[in-house]
Amino acid sequence: MFNKFREEKMTWYTEISSFMITISIVIILAYSFLQSCPPTEAIKSSNSNLDPLFNYRQSPNFKNSAECTAFSKSSIPTKICNPSLVHISMTLDTKFLRGSVAAIHSILQHCHCPDNLFFHFISSDKSINLEPHLAKIFPLLSFKIYYFNPGIVQNKISSSVREALEHPLNYARNYLADLLEPCVERVIYLDSDIILVDDISNLWGTSLGSTTVGSPQYCHANFTNYFTPKFWSHKRFYRTFHGRRPCYFNTGVMVMDLTKWRKYRYTKKLEKWMKIQRVHRIYELGSLPPFLLVFAGKIAPIHQKWNQHGLGGDNLSGSCRNIHAGPVSLLHWSGGGKPWLRLDTGRSCPLDELWARYDLHDQK
């Protein structure tokens, strides 16, 4: 058993109870974390002394393995257009900054070639410059922050079952093809409430075939629940799925072909459904249903280990949940509860302790 815990690959196969699944993951992550991470250093800055929001320890400096392709040092504008890099996009704001930092930390820790990653962060707040804070936490990180104007979607968003789903930044992924440089042809989009326990380059290597979006899909889920009775009672709405076998997929983890996205103008197609929603109330789950309307039944299915979602509990109560049986590469705290909030209030769920291993926030 001891030798098994030394393996670098972070996937687990299990046919035992949910309790044993949780215990196994805790042991594996704890061992890997202690083996690969030198002590972190506290970041001292004038801003962090004034606001605990920016009190973070500095991440260890993760280096490429010997087998990685070496890239010459170049400026950010030049590096952005390098198609050999793994391009990752996430939203960035103060409310979810702690989650974003933990997610980045986990990605770097488990990547064999961390120098070959480039992060595209999307922010909608001009009042706070997060770039210097991020650069202090991750000194070697290659990244750029893009501004997303909330006014673009302000009049297109309708009320949702949970207020957090109505934030304009949730819709930034609809506009990645416009926000990112035209030379960026492919990107992995990730929510801020995730951690990876596998090498993200394995996700990057997913074949999309002729499709534009790849994501784990869940055909056992009751697809009708994602739309209102009004949607299913009007043929002009539900006929959009004619000729497709639509399945639920979670938009918090997607591999996106931006070249095809731009060619087929998918942003406009998403906006069309958002405008219909404002008038007819055909769904209640924020930015997800437009993606289902446009892409469900037409995505490249990715292994479900890349999105063990729902760990935040349901959209309202945020109750504790366990992972699904099977291998795990990415854990996702989608739902009403976020691990950093539950940990701070002393009401954490068992799997929140796994997230905490990547938390760089300094409570002092």
Image: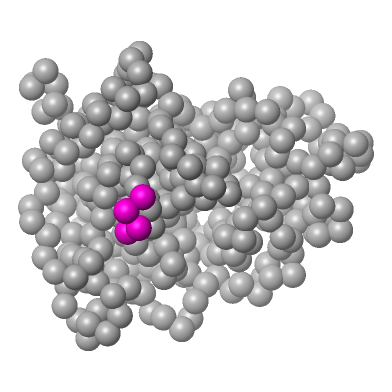
Q: Position of residue 133 (x, y in %)?
A: 28, 74
Q: Is residue 346 magenta?
A: yes
At x 71%, y 25%, the residue is 245
**Residue 78 seen in the figure:** no
Where residue 29 appears, as percent x and y from the top left, is 21, 37
Q: How is the image coloured?
A: one colour
Which residue is outermost to the top? 15
Residue 188, image x and y in percent? Answer: 45, 47
Q: Is residue 19 left or right of residue 230?
A: left
- Residue at the farthest front position: 346
Query: Looking at the image, can residue 166 be seen?
Result: yes
Q: Quadrant of residue 211?
A: top right
Q: What is the quadrant of the C terminus in the image? A: bottom left
From the viewer's side, name the closer residue of 202 and 184: 202
- In the image, taking residue 264 as reference, residue 29 lies left or right, namely left
Magenta segment range? 343-347
Query: What residue is at 8 percent from the left and 21 percent from the top?
Result: 3
Q: Quadrant of residue 43?
A: bottom left
Vertical placement of residue 119 versus 236, above or below: below
Taking 14 as reference, is 73 above or below it? below
- Quadrant containing the N terminus is top left
| Residue 152 vs residue 358, the one in the foreground | 358
**Residue 47 magenta-highlighted:** no
Q: Quadrant of residue 221?
A: top right
Q: Nearer the viewer, residue 43 or 177?
A: 43
**Residue 20: x percent and y percent?**
29, 22
